[in-house]
Amino acid sequence: METTLLSSSSTGATASNVAANGSASATSNMFTKLLVAQIQNQDPTSPTDPSTFVNQLAQLSQTEALQKVSDLTSANASILQSLQVLAMGAQVGSSVMATSDSVQLGSDPVAGSFTLASASAKTNVVLTGSDGVKHTITLGAKGAGEVPFSIDPTALGLTAGRYSMAVETDSGTPPSIQIAGTLSSVKLSSAGAVTLIMSNLGEVAPSAVTSFNGVTPATATPN
């Protein structure tokens, strides 16, 4: 499937380059015709300074060079995007950490963490459901650094659904939260945007991912 994505993107980039080159060629031909017409229709008694034509030709060359650079940059961006999709696709099934301000809960516990810039004597993770009711996970005093936590829906009496998240500290500066999940798929939209689908989070932008932790080994089933 990933190969198809690369082929499609590369084909699109090639088509764009052909169209751009055709447009540049048409512009060049038009410029040449205008230049010839200008030379043919100049006043014989007061001809145009030849250096003017040279300057115009130099400007055309510069414009064509800039167009080629622009086309090459666009093609490289398309190829890099395709490589990103392939790289992300190779991570499907991996355990992933990603920043988010909400979490999708079912019946299983969800692991998360955040990083404190300084120690906090009172630290809480607050979950708010669609009904507006807040549920607090009390973590107590925590030192500076990474603080792991777990959301256990059963223990907290939370029904399945999406909850917004926030960290409360005595410093008043809430850190961003990372949630663990499994990368289930990678999508490429018609506009070229890459979107990751993660358990516990749903759709996630690649920029939100903070770590890939590999595939979790399957637990052996006893005979």
Image (spheres, grey):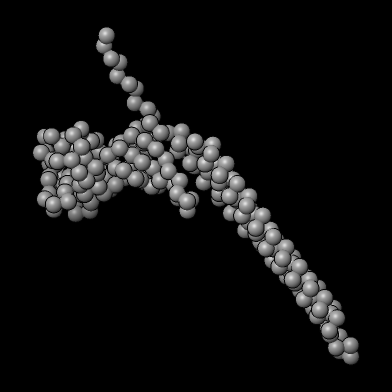
Q: Is residue 206 visible?
A: no
Is 54 rendered above or below residue 106?
Answer: below
Question: Is 103 left, or right, of 190 in this rendering?
Answer: left
Q: Between residues 113 and 169, which one lies in front from this camera angle?
A: 113
The residue sitting at 23% across, 51% down in the picture is 174
Question: Is 42 left, or right, of 63 in this rendering?
Answer: right
Question: Is 202 left, or right, of 136 in this rendering?
Answer: right
Q: Quadrant of the C terminus?
A: top left
Q: Residue furthest top?
A: 223
Question: Residue 186, image x and y in percent?
Answer: 42, 40
Classify residue 124 by image quadrant. Answer: top left
The residue sitting at 71% across, 68% down in the picture is 27
Classify residue 34 by image quadrant. Answer: bottom right
Q: Is residue 11 visible?
A: yes
Q: Residue furthest right?
A: 45
The residue sitting at 76% across, 68% down in the picture is 29
The residue sitting at 64% across, 54% down in the picture is 17
Question: Residue 167, image x and y in percent?
Answer: 20, 48
Question: Residue 104, image x and y in percent?
Answer: 24, 42
Is 64 rendered above or below residue 46?
Answer: above
Query: In the rendered picture of this protein, how many numbered marks are placed on residues?
Result: 0
Q: Between residues 170 and 161, which one lies in front from this camera angle?
A: 161
Question: Residue 30, image x and y in percent?
Answer: 74, 71
Q: Residue furthest bottom?
A: 45
